[in-house]
Image (cartoon, rainbow, N blue to C red):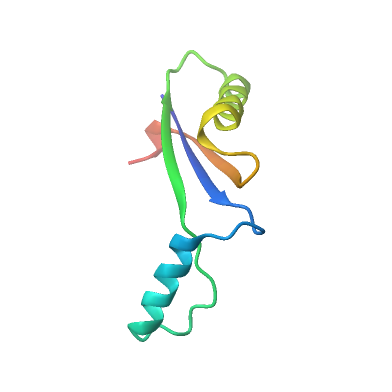
């Protein structure tokens, strides 16, 4: 099996009110040395072994573009790893 972790975050130009609220709350708790905080989404997809690396890449990009990330507001990146290497 192959595991793909997809990380979706807001683009730099998009205001993230949830991240700003957390950053302010951390400041009130005394963690005022934090200058930036990002909040995003993480997805973990497990693919069957019969797909090649190129097929998985193609499918992940298609899934992200069609469903997981809003192209206008978000960027995504992903990491592909063999599940046997993950212990």
Q: How many marks?
A: 0
Query: In the figure, 10 relative to 44: above or below?
Result: below
Q: Nearer the viewer, residue 40 or 15?
A: 15
Residue 45 x %, y %: 43, 30
Q: Nearer the viewer, residue 36 or 49?
A: 36
Residue 55 x %, y %: 60, 19
Quadrant of the rendered image containing residue 3: top left
Q: For the point 38% across and 32% down, which residue is it?
A: 84
Residue 59 x %, y %: 57, 22
Q: Quadrant of the N terminus?
A: top left
Residue 36 x %, y %: 54, 71
Relative to residue 12, is residue 46 drawn left or right? left
Query: In the figure, 62 relative to 28: above or below?
Result: above
Q: Nearer the viewer, residue 79 or 72?
A: 72
Query: In the figure, 6 relative to 10: above or below?
Result: above
Q: For the point 59% across and 46% down, which residue is it?
A: 74
Furthest residue in direction top, as rendered:
50
Q: Quadrant of the C terminus?
A: top left
Query: In the figure, 9 relative to 5: above or below?
Result: below
């Amino acid at each position: 099996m192959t595991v793909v972790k997809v990380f979706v975050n807001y683009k730099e130009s998009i205001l993230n009110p949830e991240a700003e609220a957390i950053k302010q709350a951390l400041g009130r708790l005394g963690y005022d040395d934090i200058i930036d905080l990002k909040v995003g989404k993480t997805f973990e997809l497990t693919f069957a072994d019969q797909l090649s690396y190129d097929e998985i890449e193609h499918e992940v990009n298609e899934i992200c573009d069609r469903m997981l990330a809003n192209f206008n507001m978000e960027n995504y990146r992903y990491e592909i790893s063999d599940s046997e290497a993950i212990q």
